[in-house]
Amino acid sequence: MSEDKFMQVLIGPQHPGSGHMRFIVKMDGDIISEFEPDIGYVHRAVEKIAESKRYIQIVPLVERPILADTANINLGYILALERLLGIDAPPRAQYLRTLLAEINRIHSHLYGLGIHGIMIGSSTIFMWCFADREIWIELAQELTGARITYSYMIPGGVRRDLPNGFNEKLSKAIAYMEERLKDYEKIFINNPVVTARLIDVGIIKKDDAIKLGIVGPNLRASGVAYDVRKIEPYCAYPEIDFDIIVRKEGDAYSRVLVRFEEIKQSMKIVKQVVEKIPSGPIINESYLKLIPPKLREKAEQTGIWKMPAIFINLKPRKGEAISRVEAGRGEVTHYIVSDGSPNPYRFRVVTPSFRNLIAFKYTMPGHRLADIPAIYGSLDYFPPSADR
Amino acid sequence: MMSLNELKEMIEKELGALAFKVDSEAPNLIIINVEAPNLFEVAFKLNHMGFDHVKVVTGTDYPIEKKIELVYHVSSYTNIDLAKVIIALKIRLDKSNPKVKSLVKIWPSAEYLERETYDLVGIIFEDHPKLERLLLPSDWDQIPPLWKDFKIKTEGIDA
């Protein structure tokens, strides 16, 4: 084969559906022969910045790369930090954490589904998903006071208690969403154009998914029943009944279906959370003591806690901790090395999108140029989250 | 169901003299310290035991000791007992010459994680399929940014 047979196509980084990244594609006619993702255009040096921040200041910092799923990445960081501090959140806080994590999972999946829709030309599903995502953002705002960047989980607990009337709003949202998902099925999931573009496209075989270390719904769509919520249950998950959605096909369509079904599972989880949530404090007793009595009284009345100023001086023990959490897009891993000072010595976060990056390189070859958006969207890849 | 200690003993037996120290830390961590030349063989044995993928690769700079610590966090997707545990496989490299054989041949999932560690911490992974800049610009010519002697330049009133 002579070299001139191939043509190099550069897609991005000016976001023509590539996200903030570039693809360097070697084409053989209309067939992709090599595919190299070129990332780093939205690298924020979160790990380096973290070394100069106090532990509590890292909470908002880690949220920035994953805007659709801030609760889960925040939770992962807090779990690692709590392991170093040797502290735990009380049961009510564990339930509240689970509640926000699942609301965020629904948000994240709707975001992914919508973006995937627009990538393959279905602007209706994009509009619908983005409009319906608003409902879950509103719920999160009701709970935390913020729409996207909640900084809700803090060491030893959460910032706010369940507001009055939340359960009614949640049941309304669930009832609405359940009906909406039926519409989604009609216009997107069972749409012949969608199935023609996605079925048997971008297959990741089970062995390859394991070998490449793929995470989240992409992994489960390839037949691997790995979900951190079941493997290493954290927060309230041990007491909640839900299923892991697994499919065998491993193609782009099965990845969509896994996310679609996971929205239903998440709704099942939040329903149980508000039913089963125990009463009690939302911050660990040893931290509660640090709050001056007057402020404490006020906080107990309103359910809104201000972090005690002493939090800025949190000093975990010398040592290291690793945590994993199942975020919307997959497993997020936080690794903290502490030298006993108020700043981490080394902070490492590996996001699901970075773990899934490798799938581009090894899944795309053999497909047609027009399959790139279909496969890309199905991987639910988010460049800022991969770059960090 | 295997306990963390049983698993630790199993690994100690399997690795023998290849690992100079194996620790376990509740609830889920097993830390294996090895000498750099033994890393590849240890990784091969762990993979054989069922630890099938890499979750994190981290390089940490220790300027006073002039060392860089390299950690691979590995676990399993296929074996549910092993999946509950995370292995931290650790080596220490000289900062003046941080070179080690890449583990991509054993764990393909390490490809981009090692490449990122090369990019930001400056560890050279021999035999890596594509050891190039990833997050940094391709013409980056300063020291690796995650070394402690790399100071962030501030802007505005602090500058």
Image: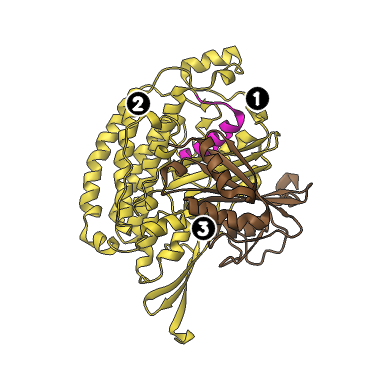
Chain colours: A yellow, B brown
Looking at the image, is mark 2 or mark 3 nearer the viewer?
A: 3
Give how far apart the Cα atoms at labels 1 and 3 are.
Answer: 44 Å
| Residue linked to disc 1 | A310
Secondary structure under the numbered disc 3 in the rendered image? loop
Q: Position of residue A166 (x, y in %)?
A: 35, 26
Q: Quadrant of the N terminus of chain A?
A: bottom left
The disc at residue B107 is 3
Q: Position of residue A52 (x, y in %)?
A: 69, 42
Q: Disc 1 is attached to a residue of which chain?
A: A
Secondary structure under the numbered disc 2 in the rendered image? helix
Q: Is residue B13 magenta?
A: no
Residue B59 appearing in the image: no
Looking at this view, is A374 or A156 the one in front? A156
The disc at residue A50 is none
Badge 1 crowding class, 10 Å Cα cut-off, few under 14, some 14 to 19, many 20 or more, is few
| Residue linked to disc 2 | A274
Q: Position of residue A369 (x, y in %)?
A: 37, 71
